[in-house]
Protein backbone atom coordinates (compact mmCIF):
# COMPACT_ATOMS: atom_id res chain seq x y z
CA UNK A 1 0.00 0.00 0.00
CA UNK A 2 1.04 3.62 -0.43
CA UNK A 3 3.13 4.88 2.45
CA UNK A 4 4.63 8.25 3.35
CA UNK A 5 7.29 8.51 6.02
CA UNK A 6 8.50 11.58 7.84
CA UNK A 7 10.86 11.71 10.81
CA UNK A 8 8.71 11.20 13.86
CA UNK A 9 11.31 12.68 16.18
CA UNK A 10 11.27 16.43 16.64
CA UNK A 11 14.02 18.41 14.96
CA UNK A 12 15.68 20.92 17.26
CA UNK A 13 17.94 23.55 15.71
CA UNK A 14 19.50 26.86 16.61
CA UNK A 15 18.15 30.10 15.21
CA UNK A 16 19.90 31.11 12.00
CA UNK A 17 20.72 27.55 10.95
CA UNK A 18 19.14 25.66 8.06
CA UNK A 19 16.46 23.14 8.95
CA UNK A 20 16.14 20.11 6.68
CA UNK A 21 13.12 17.83 6.85
CA UNK A 22 12.74 14.56 4.94
CA UNK A 23 9.75 12.91 3.29
CA UNK A 24 10.06 9.41 1.84
CA UNK A 25 7.36 7.49 0.03
CA UNK A 26 6.87 3.94 -1.22
CA UNK A 27 4.55 2.10 -3.60
CA UNK A 28 3.67 5.35 -5.22
CA UNK A 29 4.56 7.52 -8.21
CA UNK A 30 3.11 10.94 -7.50
CA UNK A 31 3.07 13.66 -10.09
CA UNK A 32 2.89 16.33 -7.38
CA UNK A 33 4.19 16.67 -3.85
CA UNK A 34 3.18 19.34 -1.36
CA UNK A 35 4.41 20.69 1.97
CA UNK A 36 2.15 22.16 4.63
CA UNK A 37 2.77 23.85 7.96
CA UNK A 38 0.55 23.10 10.96
CA UNK A 39 0.57 25.03 14.19
CA UNK A 40 -1.01 23.59 17.36
CA UNK A 41 -4.79 23.87 17.32
CA UNK A 42 -4.91 25.03 13.71
CA UNK A 43 -5.49 23.51 10.29
CA UNK A 44 -2.55 22.92 7.92
CA UNK A 45 -1.40 25.84 5.76
CA UNK A 46 -0.21 25.21 2.20
CA UNK A 47 3.42 26.18 1.61
CA UNK A 48 4.78 24.75 -1.61
CA UNK A 49 3.92 22.37 -4.43
CA UNK A 50 6.55 20.70 -6.60
CA UNK A 51 5.92 18.71 -9.75
CA UNK A 52 7.67 15.48 -10.71
CA UNK A 53 9.56 17.21 -13.53
CA UNK A 54 10.86 19.91 -11.16
CA UNK A 55 14.00 19.08 -9.22
CA UNK A 56 13.84 22.08 -6.92
CA UNK A 57 11.50 24.87 -5.99
CA UNK A 58 12.07 27.96 -3.84
CA UNK A 59 9.87 30.43 -2.04
CA UNK A 60 11.58 33.07 0.08
CA UNK A 61 13.53 31.11 2.76
CA UNK A 62 11.96 27.79 1.76
CA UNK A 63 13.40 25.26 -0.66
CA UNK A 64 11.95 21.91 -1.69
CA UNK A 65 13.60 19.18 -3.71
CA UNK A 66 11.88 16.19 -5.31
CA UNK A 67 13.88 13.10 -6.30
CA UNK A 68 11.56 10.60 -8.00
CA UNK A 69 14.38 8.04 -8.26
CA UNK A 70 15.03 8.06 -4.52
CA UNK A 71 11.30 8.60 -3.85
CA UNK A 72 12.20 11.42 -1.52
CA UNK A 73 11.56 15.10 -0.95
CA UNK A 74 13.67 17.40 1.20
CA UNK A 75 12.27 20.58 2.72
CA UNK A 76 14.74 23.27 3.77
CA UNK A 77 14.22 26.43 5.81
CA UNK A 78 17.24 28.69 5.64
CA UNK A 79 18.08 31.31 8.29
CA UNK A 80 15.54 29.66 10.58
CA UNK A 81 13.66 31.71 13.16
CA UNK A 82 11.76 30.73 16.32
CA UNK A 83 8.57 31.66 14.42
CA UNK A 84 9.29 28.74 12.07
CA UNK A 85 8.63 26.33 14.93
CA UNK A 86 5.68 24.15 13.86
CA UNK A 87 4.86 20.72 12.46
CA UNK A 88 5.59 20.32 8.77
CA UNK A 89 3.54 17.86 6.75
CA UNK A 90 4.40 16.25 3.45
CA UNK A 91 1.46 15.34 1.20
CA UNK A 92 1.10 13.52 -2.10
CA UNK A 93 -1.74 13.84 -4.58
CA UNK A 94 -3.56 10.63 -5.40
CA UNK A 95 -6.71 9.37 -7.05
CA UNK A 96 -6.91 11.61 -10.07
CA UNK A 97 -5.13 14.48 -8.34
CA UNK A 98 -8.00 15.43 -6.08
CA UNK A 99 -7.06 13.51 -2.94
CA UNK A 100 -4.17 14.19 -0.61
CA UNK A 101 -2.31 11.52 1.35
CA UNK A 102 -0.45 13.04 4.30
CA UNK A 103 2.61 12.00 6.22
CA UNK A 104 2.46 12.17 10.00
CA UNK A 105 4.59 15.31 10.02
CA UNK A 106 7.84 16.37 11.65
CA UNK A 107 7.85 18.87 14.48
CA UNK A 108 10.49 21.58 14.14
CA UNK A 109 11.64 23.62 17.14
CA UNK A 110 13.92 26.59 16.47
CA UNK A 111 15.67 27.83 19.58
CA UNK A 112 16.92 31.42 20.06
CA UNK B 1 -6.45 31.43 -0.93
CA UNK B 2 -9.83 30.96 0.76
CA UNK B 3 -11.15 31.83 4.19
CA UNK B 4 -12.77 28.83 5.81
CA UNK B 5 -14.70 28.75 9.07
CA UNK B 6 -15.90 25.75 11.01
CA UNK B 7 -18.51 25.45 13.73
CA UNK B 8 -18.25 24.41 16.46
CA UNK B 9 -14.57 24.89 17.18
CA UNK B 10 -14.77 22.24 19.88
CA UNK B 11 -17.34 20.11 21.67
CA UNK B 12 -17.61 17.46 24.34
CA UNK B 13 -20.32 14.91 23.59
CA UNK B 14 -21.84 11.86 25.22
CA UNK B 15 -21.43 8.50 23.56
CA UNK B 16 -24.36 7.46 21.42
CA UNK B 17 -25.21 11.02 20.37
CA UNK B 18 -24.49 12.77 17.06
CA UNK B 19 -22.73 16.03 16.22
CA UNK B 20 -22.98 18.05 13.03
CA UNK B 21 -19.98 20.15 12.03
CA UNK B 22 -20.42 23.04 9.62
CA UNK B 23 -17.88 24.32 7.09
CA UNK B 24 -18.36 27.70 5.40
CA UNK B 25 -16.10 29.16 2.69
CA UNK B 26 -15.96 32.82 1.74
CA UNK B 27 -16.16 32.10 -2.00
CA UNK B 28 -17.23 29.39 -4.40
CA UNK B 29 -14.86 26.44 -4.57
CA UNK B 30 -14.65 23.34 -6.71
CA UNK B 31 -13.83 20.68 -4.20
CA UNK B 32 -14.59 20.29 -0.50
CA UNK B 33 -13.09 17.57 1.67
CA UNK B 34 -13.45 16.29 5.21
CA UNK B 35 -10.45 14.95 7.14
CA UNK B 36 -9.89 13.45 10.56
CA UNK B 37 -6.73 13.97 12.57
CA UNK B 38 -6.35 11.81 15.66
CA UNK B 39 -3.91 12.88 18.37
CA UNK B 40 -0.33 12.59 17.14
CA UNK B 41 -1.45 11.16 13.81
CA UNK B 42 -1.52 12.38 10.25
CA UNK B 43 -4.64 13.63 8.50
CA UNK B 44 -6.90 10.94 7.06
CA UNK B 45 -9.38 11.75 4.31
CA UNK B 46 -12.93 10.79 5.26
CA UNK B 47 -14.75 11.83 2.10
CA UNK B 48 -15.08 14.30 -0.75
CA UNK B 49 -18.24 16.39 -0.46
CA UNK B 50 -19.97 16.68 -3.83
CA UNK B 51 -22.34 19.51 -4.53
CA UNK B 52 -25.86 18.25 -5.12
CA UNK B 53 -24.99 14.55 -4.90
CA UNK B 54 -23.80 11.92 -2.45
CA UNK B 55 -20.33 12.28 -0.99
CA UNK B 56 -17.50 9.99 -2.10
CA UNK B 57 -16.21 8.06 0.92
CA UNK B 58 -12.75 6.63 1.46
CA UNK B 59 -12.13 3.08 2.52
CA UNK B 60 -13.08 2.58 6.15
CA UNK B 61 -15.64 5.38 6.24
CA UNK B 62 -19.36 4.91 5.57
CA UNK B 63 -22.28 7.22 4.99
CA UNK B 64 -24.31 5.90 7.93
CA UNK B 65 -21.57 6.89 10.35
CA UNK B 66 -20.44 10.12 8.64
CA UNK B 67 -23.30 11.58 6.60
CA UNK B 68 -22.20 14.61 4.59
CA UNK B 69 -24.18 17.32 2.86
CA UNK B 70 -23.08 19.97 0.38
CA UNK B 71 -26.11 22.00 -0.71
CA UNK B 72 -24.07 24.66 -2.55
CA UNK B 73 -20.53 25.65 -3.55
CA UNK B 74 -19.66 27.38 -0.28
CA UNK B 75 -21.11 25.19 2.49
CA UNK B 76 -20.87 21.61 3.74
CA UNK B 77 -21.71 19.67 6.88
CA UNK B 78 -20.27 16.50 8.38
CA UNK B 79 -22.24 14.57 10.99
CA UNK B 80 -20.52 12.14 13.32
CA UNK B 81 -23.26 9.69 14.25
CA UNK B 82 -23.72 7.40 17.22
CA UNK B 83 -20.43 8.57 18.67
CA UNK B 84 -18.02 6.49 20.70
CA UNK B 85 -14.79 7.55 22.46
CA UNK B 86 -12.86 6.31 19.40
CA UNK B 87 -14.41 9.19 17.44
CA UNK B 88 -12.56 11.71 19.60
CA UNK B 89 -10.45 13.59 17.10
CA UNK B 90 -10.00 16.84 15.22
CA UNK B 91 -12.22 17.10 12.15
CA UNK B 92 -11.02 19.39 9.37
CA UNK B 93 -12.70 20.76 6.30
CA UNK B 94 -10.58 21.68 3.29
CA UNK B 95 -11.28 23.20 -0.12
CA UNK B 96 -9.62 23.62 -3.48
CA UNK B 97 -10.45 25.95 -6.33
CA UNK B 98 -11.34 25.54 -9.99
CA UNK B 99 -8.16 25.72 -12.02
CA UNK B 100 -5.95 25.09 -9.02
CA UNK B 101 -7.28 21.92 -7.52
CA UNK B 102 -3.85 20.85 -6.32
CA UNK B 103 -3.59 23.31 -3.45
CA UNK B 104 -5.88 22.73 -0.53
CA UNK B 105 -6.89 25.26 2.09
CA UNK B 106 -7.94 24.06 5.49
CA UNK B 107 -10.37 25.29 8.09
CA UNK B 108 -9.29 25.65 11.73
CA UNK B 109 -10.75 22.29 12.69
CA UNK B 110 -13.31 21.03 15.20
CA UNK B 111 -11.93 19.31 18.27
CA UNK B 112 -14.37 16.60 19.35
CA UNK B 113 -14.17 14.73 22.64
CA UNK B 114 -16.56 11.85 23.25
CA UNK B 115 -17.05 10.71 26.84
Image (cartoon, helix red, strand yellow):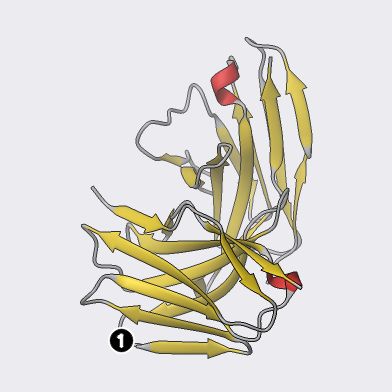
* Horizontal relation, residue B54 to residue A27: left or right: right
The answer to whether A100 is drawn above or below residue B80 in the figure is: below
Counting from the top left corner in percent of width and height, residue A42 is at: 71, 52
For mark 1, give the secondary structure: loop
Which residue shows up at 48% across the image and 76% down it? A75
Tell which subunit mark 1 falls on: A
Q: Nearer the viewer, residue B45 or B97?
A: B45
Estimate how packed mark 1 is, as few (under 14), some (14 to 19) or many (20 or more) residues with alpha carbons within 10 Å.
Answer: few
Q: Quadrant of residue A46?
A: bottom right
Name the quarter where the C terminus of chain B is drawn. top right
Residue B56 visible, this angle: yes
Residue A61 position by quadrant: bottom right
> Can you give x and y, in whole percent of width and height, for residue A34 in the image?
47, 70
In percent of width and height, residue A15 lies at: 70, 78
Along the line of sight, which residue is nearer the eye, B90 or A83?
A83
Q: Position of residue B7 (x, y in %)?
A: 78, 40
Residue with the mark numbered 1: A53
Amino acid sequence: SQKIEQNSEALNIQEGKTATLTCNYTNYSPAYLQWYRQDPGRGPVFLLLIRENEKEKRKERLKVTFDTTLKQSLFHITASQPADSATYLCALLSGGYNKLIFGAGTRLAVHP
Amino acid sequence: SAVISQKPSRDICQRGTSLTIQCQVDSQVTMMFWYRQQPGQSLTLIATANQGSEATYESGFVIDKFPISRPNLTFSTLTVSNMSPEDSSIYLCSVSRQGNVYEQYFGPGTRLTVT
